[in-house]
Structures are given as C-alpha cells and as structure tokens.
Amino acid sequence: MKKFFLNLLSSFMGAWIAIVLSGVVAVIIIFSLVGGVVGGSVESVKDGCILRIGLDGEIVERDMSSQIDVMSLLKKDFNTPQSVSTLVTAINEAATDNRVKSIYLDCGYLSASPASLHAIRNALLEFKTSKKKIYAYADVMTQGAYFVASVADEISLNPAGNFNLRGLGGQSLFYKGLFDKVGVSFQAVRVGKGKAAVEPYTADTMSQVARAQNIALLDTLWIQMRREIASSRNAVTPALIDTLIDRDYISSKPASFAVSNKLVDKLEYRHVFEDRIAKLAKQDDGLENVVTPSALVAASATMSENVGASNQIAVLYASGGIDDFMGSGGISSPDMVDQILELSKNDDVKALVLRVNSPGGSAFGSEQMWEALETFKKTGKTFVVSMGDYAASGGYYISCGADRIFADPFTITGSIGIFGLIPNIKGLVDKIGLSVQTVATNPNGLYPAVFTPMDEQQLAAMQAMVEDGYNLFVKRVAEGRKLPVAKVKEVADGRPLSAVVARGHGLVDDLGSLQNAIDWAKKKAKVERENVVIYPKPDMNFVKLMGSINESVLFKLLSADDPAALGEEAVFVLQNMFDRDMVMARMYPFEVKL
C-alpha cells in the first residue's frame, strides 16, 4: 500500500515536504552528506584478487543516485542497493581481467525479482567459459541466492546453517476493508477479464480469474527455475527439488541434509572456507586481496555516460511506474518523450535499445511515449527493446513498436488491457463533518467528482472511454507486432504472461539479455565500432529525494482509529491524490521476489 500511494503522490508530497523542511537548509545538509558518500577513496584492483559478490539485500535494475533515501542519509546509513547492471558488468570484466583469479559468491538474504537474478546467473555461466572458478558460501542459503549460486563450481554451507527452498509464491494486499473504515470507496471500469488491477480496491478477495492466471504464471516460472538449477547440479533433478520441498520440508532440515541430497558440496565454517579459497588464489595470508563489483566496473568502458561519443548505441532505461507528469519518481512520460526526441535528432546515435522494467501506469503517458518512439523510427534508426523484470501493460505498450523485442525467460509481460479507478470520498467527508455544496452550469460539469458516486450514465461514459483506450492499445500492438487485431485480442484480455509464453504468441521475438539486444542493434544498424551510452544520466534530484520520506497525512489517515481527528487536512491530501490520471494501463499488483 505504501508503494502505491508514494507512486501517486510523489510530486505533491515531494514539494510539500520540501517546504516543511525549509528547502534551502535541507539541500545544504543532504548534499554535504552525499558528498561525503561519493567523495571517498577509490578501491584499487590488485593482481591475484578475488571478486567478492554479496548476494544479499536488494538488487535493483540500475545504479541511480536519485534512489538514495533521505532518512537513511540523515541517519548516516549510506548503504545503497546493488544493481544488475553493475554486477553483470563486473562479472564480464572479471572473465577477461587477468588480475582476477576467481569469484566468491557470498550468499545472504536476497531480495530481487527472478529476471534480475537470471541475468546475473547467465553472466556467471558465461564467466565459467574463462576456466576461472566460482565459489559460493552461505551461513543460510536462501532460495534466490541458491538460484544464482547453483552455477558455482563449489557450494559451501555453514554446518549450523540451513537450506531454504520453498518454490515460488506471491501475495497481494486488498485494501477495500481498510478504505471502508475511513469512508473511501472506488468505482471501477475495465476491459479484459484478466485486468485484475482494480480488485485490491473494489474487493476483499482475489477473483478466480486473477488466481488462475497468477498460478499459471508462477508455474511457468517455477518450471524454468527448477530446470536451470538441475542443469547446474548433476545429481539434482526438477522432481527431486519438488520432493525436497513438499515431502521433506527441506527448509526445516539440518545443513547436512542439503549435502546428502547433492544441493551443496561442503559443510564448513566461513573462516575455513575463506582461507581455503585464498590459498587456491595463492594468497598466503588469508583472504585479504578481494575486489568489489563497483571497483572492478569503475575502470570499465563497456557502458558509459559519454553522451558526446560517436557511433552510439543508446541504452535508454525506462524503469518504474508510468506517470504523465514531470519529475516523476518512476517513468515520467514528459521527461521520457523529451529524451527520445533528443536521441532521434542526435546524429551520433545510430540505434536505440529501450530497457523496459515497468508494470505500466498512465495510459495517456504510455501513448505519448509510443508516439515519440515512432518518431524515432521514422529517422531510419534501429529501435530495439530489452525487457527486464516487468514489461507489462503500459510497459508493453511502449515496447510493441520495436524492430525486435528481447526478454528474459523470467520477464513478466503482456497484461494488455486498460482500467479506470474512480474514487469516492463522500463517506470520509461525512465522517469528519464537512459539507460539500456544488454549483455548475451543466449536470455533468464536475464529472467525475470525488465527493459523490457516479450514476449509471456516467459509468457507461467512463466504460466507453476505457474501451476506446483499449482498442487503441490493441491497434498499437497489432501494428507493431504485425499481428491481426483478432489475434491480439485473443492473447490480451489483460492477462500477465511469462516471456516464454509471450514469445509463443508473437509478443516477444527472442529470449535474451540486454547485451543480446545491444548486439542485435549493432548488427542491424551496421555499426562496426560502437560506443554504448546509457541514458538518462543519473541525477541528484532534490524533489525525488524528498519523495522518499515515509511519513504523510495519508498514512496517518488510513491507520487512524478516528479519521475525523485529521479533519480537512486529510481530505486535501486525498483529493490531490485523486486528481491524478484515473485511466491506467497497469498490471495486477502481484510481485514475485526470491
């Protein structure tokens, strides 16, 4: 719920909090702290080193300075998430850097989506062709870490640790009962039986349609995951993995059980493991010569931010929810449109690879970006899409016109549909004793209004508008993928799909990585010596930083025993939230993490 409201309120709350904190003073404090973070010494890469990769904590798509959390800075907690781009680049560099002798996977409690972990896993598999070794260690082996670490030449587990394997699952919060408490309700219009994104606000439980499609999606991902783990562990089969979970409750077994079933090679304490791999790398004084992924990437020229380079393959990141206002914390369609049009006019840019990691959002914003990308294509330049964890609904809308679409097998895509979610806060207004008086020249002059529910005619008008938006969405997909409209509607229906299934329907061309997409773009654009340049350039945007603060009137409202105590202020905040785009192309809020 917090993530949902932060997406809707990011620009409003950012400005509001900035005022409260007396902007100028806060800027000085925050940027002085950030300066201390980024101004430290640069780690060197020494001969005979081991690349240590911590498979722990959150892993995000790309390093972005705007992801730094303000409250963490004020507490001098400077830990920032690792990114897929840095880890993959570091692994690739380690394969060819003679100073790096091996990789140490230090496994912990990992939080990342399957597609992100699969990208790291594939990079490690490619690393193994260098004949260098990969060693993995865990005090407690979690499922996500094991999915990656299963490629290692040796896997060690702490004798007192355990092995956590449980299969795939996801949970969705349903807010209707909570909103009922404060007097807020929602009316929904949608196209597509599988377009279940409205359900958490209009129902108390998951519909049978939503449940069936979520199970189908998870089953597809789990089949792929079991197969890949088994391919890296000779004595392990997909059937054995399910047996260990369902019959043997492996997560409750001692560490020795994982060894006896060939999931792990050795039981040893951390210091014993580290001394052993240090000696293998000819480090006689223990494991001291290690290098971090960020240090190894620092000297890499694989991808750069040199926007003045010639013969560019531009990699443009589109990550987060899609909004239709400037300065969004996710994908701001006005900002993105400006960036795409600039790239279309830049003679140094020979091809564009759009890296999409988005569950969708504003239908209007999605259409604006689609049109900008069509303008880019009219220049004759190559346009390729690489899909990350998600490229669903609006995320697919902006992808469908590409010359070629690449997706990871674990990408969640599709969800071709549109919905409208119209709020009504009359119950809240009554609770806190406000009286709303309306005057208008026309009966529908304030349609849709947040203080009264819509009547049948108004709902019908909203439904027609959503259906028009859906038909436009389907038309864009049909034209971009060169498919009959009837075929797209058959596949669409709002259902999220795995990339494997989507490829079977013609929505995806190839199962592959970002690098595969770059290589294809290079060949199609006939560029011999390319410069891969990433966009947009990371920035330290103060308003975005302010938007990460966790306290607001809205959260207090939804957790309050007496909503009336918050009075007019609560209504003001809610009304600002409801002024946002109510017609959305966004997938069901169902997150799969390992």
Image (cartoon, grey):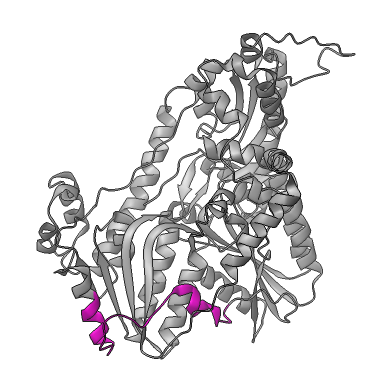
Highlighted range, magenta:
274-302
x then y, percent, for residue 310 = 73, 82
What is the tally of numbered marks visible in this picture?
0
Q: Is residue 574 magenta?
A: no
Left or right of 301, for residue 158: left
Q: Which residue is drawn at 66% across and 26% down?
A: 574
- Does residue 330 appear in this view? no
Q: Which quarter of the figure has residue 247?
A: top left
Left or right of 342, for residue 388: left
Q: Which residue is drawn at 57% across and 17% down?
A: 563
Is 368 or 55 nearer to us in this picture? 55
- Give the answer, above or below, for where 131 lies relative to 495: below
Left or right of 259, for residue 7: right
Q: Which quarter of the figure has residue 301?
A: bottom right
- Does residue 114 appear in this view? yes
- Give the answer, above or below, for where 461 lies relative to 32: above
Is 536 or 512 nearer to us in this picture? 536
x then y, percent, for residue 592 = 41, 47
Q: Does the magenta stretch include residue 291?
A: yes
x then y, percent, for residue 223 = 31, 53
x then y, percent, for residue 287 = 29, 80
Q: Residue at x 26, y 86 (%)?
A: 285
Q: Which quarter of the figure has residue 524?
A: bottom right
- Give the answer, above or below, for where 549 lies relative to 582: below
Q: Residue at x 23, y 86 (%)?
A: 279
